[in-house]
Amino acid sequence: MNTFPGESASWEGVDAYFTWANSSGMLVFLTLVTAAICLAVIIAAAKHESETSDNTK
Amino acid sequence: MTLEELNVFVTTQANVGMEAYYWWCTGLMIIIHVGFLMYEVGATRMQNAVSSGVKNLLAFAFMIPTFWLFGWWIYLAFPTGFVPGDLEGYGVPWNVSMGPMLSDQATGVFWAAFTLFACTTASIFSGSVIERIRISAFVFLAVILGSVVWILAASWGWHPDGWLVTRFGFHDVAAAGCVHTVAGLFAFGVLLNLGPRIGKYNDDGSANELEGHSLVLSFVGLLTLIVGFFGFLGACLIWAGSDFGGWVNIYGAPATLSSFAFNTLMGLAGGMIGAFWYSKGNPFWMMSGGLAGIFICAGGLDIWYPGFAFILGTIAGIVIIPANNWLHNTFKIDDCVGAVSIHGVCGMLGMLCVGLFASGFPAAGDIPPSNLIGQIVGIITMALTGFVPGYVISYIMKSAGWLRVPDHVQKAGIDKAELGLQAYNQ
C-alpha cells in the first residue's frame, strides 16, 4: 500500500509528506485510536489496582 | 552568489539552526526527568521505590500523546480566555500541521519543547504524592495538569496574545507562573484530598519524618534536574531567526541567552547557599534551595541584575523551609518533596518580584510595560488555575474511591503488592 501523498517517486507539489497525509478520515481514525489506547491503559491499570487490593487483604 | 540566493541561504540556515536548537533543548529537558526519577525514588522508602519510579516514567509517557492530542491546540486556541479562537484546523491532531511538512520546520520542534515543559509540570506534582496515590489516578491527574491546566495558563500568560499579557502587561519569561505556581498549587489541591502516608502524623497531630531510602540518590537527582533545566530555560527563548535578528522572549521583546545564563546560575547559587545556611547543612534542602533560587528568578530571568538574582535566590533558599513547615503544620499535608513550597511559593514570589522591582520594562508592540498590578493579577490567576482543578478533580476521584492506595496495600508495600517486584535484593 502506497500512502505517500504525492505522485509516486516524486516530491513535486508535496508539502505534508507523512503517511496518509491526503486522507483526513484516516488521520481522524488514527487520532481516535491513539486516544483510546491512552484511556484503555488507564482503565486497565485502575482495574489491576483494585484486584490487587482485594488480593492483598 | 546573487542577492536572492544569499537570502535563500541565510533563511535556510536560520531555519535549520532553529530546528537544531529546540531539538537539543528538548533532549536536555529529558534529563530533568532522569533527575526527577532519581530524586523521587531516593525520597521513597525502599518498599515503594519501584512504584515511585514507574509512576514518574508514566507521567512522561502519557504526557507525550495527550499533549499531541489536545495540549498544543489548547495553547494556541485559548489566549483570550475560555472560548477557543478559530485556528482553521491548525493544531488539532488530524490536521496536516501536526505532522511532517516541508514548509513548516517550526511546529514539530516547538511542540516537542512544549511537550517536555508539560512533562516537567507533571513531574513537579509527581514527587509530592509518592507512596500513597494510585498509579492510574496519578496518571489521570498528571494528564489533566500537564496537557490541560498548565497549558491553559500558559496560553493566558505565556503567549504574546494571552489576555494577561495584552491587557495587564504580565511578564513571566521563564514560566514561574504557568509551570511552577500552577504545578505547585495543583499539587496542594490534590494533597488536601489525598491525605498523608500512613504513619506520617500521630494522633496528637505531631509529625514523623518518613525518610527516603537513599539520600544520595535524591542528592544526585536534584543536581541532574538542574542540568536539565538549562534545556528548559533555553527553550523559553524564541529563536527569531532572520526575521527579527537574534533572540526574543516569549512576548516578542528583545532578550539574550546571556541574561538567562547570568541569572540562572546566580539564582541557583544563591538558593543553595541560603538553604545551606538556614537548614544548617541539610543537603536535601540545599539542592532544593538551588532549584527554588532559579524559580524565584524565572519571572524576570531576562532582566535581573545578576547580583540581585543571587539575593533573590538566597531569599528563596531560606523561605522554602519555613513555608514548607507552615504548610505541613497548618494543613497536615504530606508533601514528600516540598513541591508546594519550592515551586508554588517561589513561583508566586518570582512573579511578585517582577512587579516590585522590574516595573516599567517595555514590551513588544502594544503589550503594556511590566507593572505590579499586572503581576498581582497574574499571581491570582495562576494560583487559582492550579489549585481549583487540582482540588475539585481529586475530590471527585476521592469520592469515587479512585485516588488513594488502600491502607493495607500501603502497609504491604506497593512494589510487592501491585508490581510483584522489589527495588533491591535483600
Image (cartoon, coloured by chain):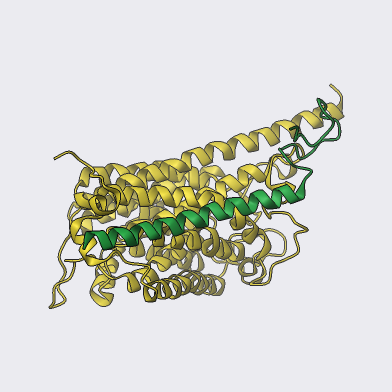
| Residue B297 makes an appearance in the image | no
- Residue placed farthest to the top in the image? B1
Measuring from the top left, give residue B274's x and y in whole percent: 28, 55
| Residue B147 makes an appearance in the image | yes
- Identity of the residue drawn at 68% across and 47% down: B98
- Residue B44 sits above or below residue B246 on the image: below
Using residue B272 as the reference point, say whether residue B394 is left or right of it: right
Chain B on-screen colour: yellow
Measuring from the top left, give residue B369's x and y in whole percent: 62, 65
Using residue B50 as the reference point, say whether residue B426 is left or right of it: left
The quadrant where residue B265 appears: top left
Using residue B407 as the reference point, say whether residue B63 is left or right of it: right
The N terminus of chain B sits in image quarter: top right
Between B131 and B117, the one lying in front of the other is: B131
Between B344 and A24, the one lying in front of the other is: A24
- Identity of the residue drawn at 77% across and 28% down: B9
* Count of numbered marks: 0
- Identity of the residue drawn at 44% across and 64% down: B181
Measuring from the top left, give residue B376's x and y in whole percent: 51, 73
- Residue B275 sits above or below residue B256 on the image: below
Using residue B80 as the reference point, say whether residue B235 is left or right of it: left
The C terminus of chain B sits in image quarter: top left
Measuring from the top left, give residue B176's x and y in whole percent: 47, 60
Chain A on-screen colour: green
The quadrant where residue B246 appears: top right
